[in-house]
Amino acid sequence: MAASPASLGCGDDAETTAVAPAPAPPMADPKIAADTLVWGGRIVTLDPTRPEVEAVAIREGVIVALGRKDDVTRLRGKDTVIVDLHGGVATPGLTDAHAHLAGLGDHLATVDLRGAKSIEEVVDRLEAGAPEAGWVIGRGWDQNLWPNAEMPTHQALSEAFPDRPVWLRRVDGHAGWANAHLLETLGLGPEVEDPEGGEFLRDEEGALTGVLVDAAMDRVSPPQPPPEERRRRLLAAQTWVLERGIVGVHDMGIDAETDALYRELLAEGELDLRVHAYASEGWFVQKLGERKADPVGVDTRYALVGVKVYVDGALGSRGAALLRPYADRPAHRGKLMHAASHFEKLALEATQRGWQVAAHAIGDRGNRTILDAYGLVDQRLRHKDNRLRVEHAQIVDPEDIARFAKIRVIASMQPTHATSDMAWVPDRIGTRRLEGAYAWRSFLSAGVHLPLGSDFPVEEVDVTHGLYAAITRQDAEGQPEGGWQPEQRMTLDEAVAGFSREAAYAVRREGHLGRLAKGYRGDLTCFAQDLWKLEAPEIRSAEVSCTIIDGELVFNGDE
């Protein structure tokens, strides 16, 4: 991005007056001049020794000075880029600690069903947005938003699309909805058996309803886009994320093709985001063999660092594994994806080889199962800095929260999941288990590291939505009054830290990412307004003015 250094960034640093302008300050020696200077607003550092500064100077991707604007100005050279906050605020670069970037690219290219209030609205969106021929693909339906809140059947899809396969993934990605044509094409009928870790939902006569849960979805293989389309989608997703102030993602459960595409974009200089990727369990077990995790340096933009494991399913589709039955399905406790011994063996072998394990666990039985496995790893490899992760940790027995801290397990959580789910969670699990539901404050009080994310495209990408949910536990309309389970709310400082400092810790990069300090990388997220001076609802819609990675403006809201 080339432009005059006097007018770059999130605003124009030049001043106009009715009198003769003051002499321009002397330019710094090119050898010490900063590449980028950020000032003109409040800069929150998350460095306890210096929590707030007026200006930051970045050279060759590294913060070389920060403090008072008058002091940092001495590093301004003739080619220095000036980022003027115009009274807004800058924070350490915000990272989404649990996301699916390729999934977002696919989501942007298919029919968006999020927020549909009925089956009829789902069909209307499909008829308006589906291609003229071939598969009808969509994602985002949630039966909890419909009048009867019941799982759908294939009839409506079969009537609308009798001769084309229809495949719609639920909002959480843990259930799929098919029409009769697709079921017939796949040879799926009443005689099919439920796979380990999955379920084919059936009606009272035993016929398939068209909803496939968790491992049952493996029977469906929609056509994959060609390589150039995959590339286009991933780049579109990157742009979408950068525009929302995110400097990095922890990409969960990628395949070999996505890994290769990331490396291609990196080699060609087209990867702006910092991406820490976790291989899908299937790819890891079948193909990665004795390969070691990628090394991570201070300037790393892409690295394959771990393996994503599924312990159970999702609460919305009743696939999460619970210690006691579902309150609204008394004969059902959800399912573990594998026997407990599988997770013990995989976690131990992967950690011994240097891979970081990130385990999806939502139900209290799922969380206890993976904590047992991690306890074995910690016992045998306590000398290592394992950084074992549990992704989501949505319903946890309160007695198990202390175990996270005891065996040094990271709880990677997503604030908007709570505000999306809160209307129906009590019906799913009853009131007794709410004490450990999306219990952010309890985890923080126990001393557990708590990186935050969104799980996009399950939720919206906007990091401001996550900040708002974390501090209010309310939906976009401000309900319920006072927040759901309000004792679990976070402060704004804690929420920002979750998306920055804690996210850096989760990938072993707290020594050079996640805060603003001399020697750290020059990653910043800038907002047009000071978040700390806004009312909570205003934070949700706060405008990102620019995104800076290694001192480079990768998104400029003024352009």
Image (cartoon, helix red, strand yellow):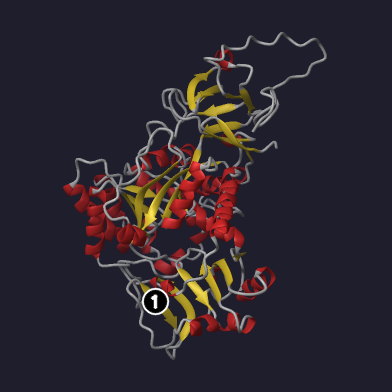
Q: Amino acid at mark 1?
A: Glu
Position above or below: 420 against 269: below
Regarding residue 441, the answer to whether it shows in the image is yes
Regarding residue 40, the answer to whether it shows in the image is no
Residue at 42% from the left image edge and 27% from the top image edge? 48
Residue 228 or residue 117, whichever sits in front? 228
Choose top left, top right, bottom left or bottom right for residue 121.
bottom right
Residue 493: x, y in percent? 48, 36
Residue 458: x, y in percent? 51, 59
Extreme residue toward the bottom, this view: 205
Residue 218: x, y in percent? 41, 71
Residue 18 or residue 491, whichever sits in front? 18
Residue 306: x, y in percent? 34, 50
Residue 254 or residue 248, whichever sits in front? 254
Choose top left, top right, bottom left or bottom right for residue 113.
bottom right
Say few, some or many: other residues with alpha carbon within 10 Å of mark 1 (under 14 / 14 to 19 / 20 or more): many
Residue 364 lies left or right of residue 255; in this view the side is left
Residue at 41% from the left image edge and 31% from the top image edge? 512
Residue at 31% from the left image edge and 69% from the top image edge? 324
Q: Name the secondary structure under disc 1.
A: strand
Count of numbered tags: 1
Quarter in which the N terminus is drawn: top right
Instruction: Report which residue position mark 1 lands on.
Output: 199
Quarter in which the C terminus is drawn: top right
Extreme residue toward the right, this view: 18
Residue 463 lies left or right of residue 512; in this view the side is right
